[in-house]
Amino acid sequence: MAIYMIGYDKAGPNYDYQPLIDAIENLGGFIHPLESTWLVKSDLKASEILDIVKKHCHSKDKLLVLEAGSDTAAILDKASAEWIYLHL
């Protein structure tokens, strides 16, 4: 299993992003450490995650999926930091 970072920029404030959030949370174990950034533990490849999640994005949204590495530094809340260091 790998840890993937999923980041997105929303195109509009009036869109319903709950389906996008649900799709991300259904991928596996996750933490939501920043407003538009998720870390997800999954057996899928980044391209497969992108295919699943992009179905819930709007045409002008931006989306990034990348595999997280072991060289990590962050200033986060305690629960997010613990999740990251436990899973990476």
Image (tube, rainbow, N blue to C red):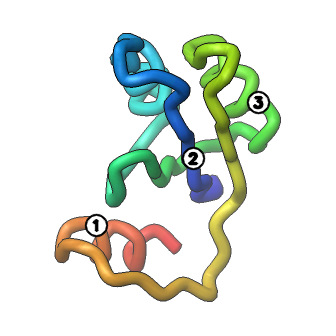
Direction from residue 37 to residue 71 in the image, left or right: right
Give the mark, 1 or 3, whose residue is nearer the N terminus: 3
Q: Which one is in front, 56 or 68?
A: 56
Q: Secondary structure at mark 3?
A: helix
Mark 2 lies on residue: 6
Q: Identify the image quadrant of residue 43.
A: top right
C-beta proximity under 8 Å, tags 1 and 3: no
Label 1 or label 2, whichever comes before in sequence order:
2
Residue 42: x, y in percent?
59, 44
Judge by depth and name the residue closer to the eye, 85 or 38. Answer: 38
54 lies above or below 74: above
Question: Mark 1: which amino acid?
Answer: Ser
Question: Which residue is drawn at the image coordinates 46% and 37% (left, top)?
Answer: 28
Quarter occupied by residue 77: bottom left
Q: Which residue is mark 1?
A: 80
Residue contact between numbered discs 1 and 2, judged by CB atoms under 8 Å: no
Label 3 close to label 2 by CB (< 8 Å):
no
* Residue positioned 33% across, 67% down in the render: 83
Cα–Cα gap, marks 3 and 2 = 12 Å
Q: What residue is shown at x 64% (from left), y 66% (from top)? A: 68
Q: Viewed as shown, does residue 58 lie left or right of 48?
A: left
Give the percent coordinates (x, y) of residue 82: 28, 75
Give the spatial CA distance, label 1 vs label 3.
25 Å
Q: Which mark is residue 48?
A: 3
Residue type at mark 2: give it.
Ile
SS at mark 1 in the image: helix
What secondary structure is marked by label 2? strand
Residue type (three-letter) at the residue carrying disc 3: Glu
Q: Is residue 66 above or below residue 15?
A: below
Q: Residue furthest right?
A: 47
